[in-house]
Amino acid sequence: MSDQKKEIFEGVAQRLKIEGFNVVNRDETRPWGGFFVIDEEQAQQFANVYFEGLNVDDLKISGKLSPKILIVAPNTRLSWQYHHRRAEIWRVVNGTVGVITSDTDEQGEVKQLTPGQSIKLKQGERHRLIGLEDWGIVSEIWQHTDPAKPSDESDIVRVQDDFGR
């Protein structure tokens, strides 16, 4: 792992610790970067800090929300994907990132999002997060749409993937 990647992850870990968040999972091994998963009990606190106090009750579809921080390396793309059991909301914390969305498998143009900007992704909507010139840090809340079977990492349908997954 590059020193820069290590530094970015340590910085985010420190910030989350200072903010009082309980990190329940940390993955630095993704080819595009990685993520931190925050304790679901802290969803409102996470929304207060990372989504300007958005009321999580307004976000709940099935009653379960999963907060995460995504870290995207420069010049990398997550897979062109969608989900059967979740919708998502993203807000850029640091860096400028690219986002592509579509209701079909055809990829449209890249929209740039800068710190403070957010986007809502519907269940089934195709989407891709892209690292541009710099490291991107994005806060994310999964909105689980099926209370009987909450979404997880297996609920990713990859339409296209640069890493052959």
Image (cartoon, helix red, strand yellow):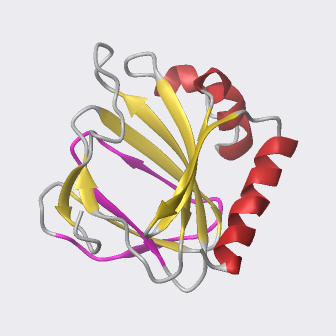
Q: Where is residue 13 in the image (x, y as percent from the top left)?
A: 75, 52
Residue furthest to the left in view is 105
Quick one: quadrant of the C terminus? bottom left
Question: Which residue occupies 20% across, 57% down?
Answer: 158
Residue furthest to the front in view is 1
- Report whether 100 appears left or right of 106: right
Q: Does the magenta stretch include residue 92?
A: no
Quick one: quadrant of the N terminus? bottom right
Picture quarter containing residue 5? bottom right
Picture quarter containing residue 93? bottom right
Q: Where is residue 51 in the image (x, y as percent from the top left)?
A: 64, 43
| Residues in magenta, as a range | 107-131
How many numbered marks does the figure carry? 0
Establish if 71 lies above or below 76. Answer: above
Q: Position of residue 84 (x, y in %)?
A: 21, 36
Question: Which residue occupies 36% across, 35% down?
Answer: 152
Which one is in front, 147 or 12?
Answer: 12
Q: Position of residue 103 (x, y in %)?
A: 17, 54
Residue furthest to the right in view is 18
Which one is in front, 22 or 119?
Answer: 22
Question: Which residue occupies 64% across, 59% down?
Answer: 116
Which one is in front, 98 or 70?
Answer: 70
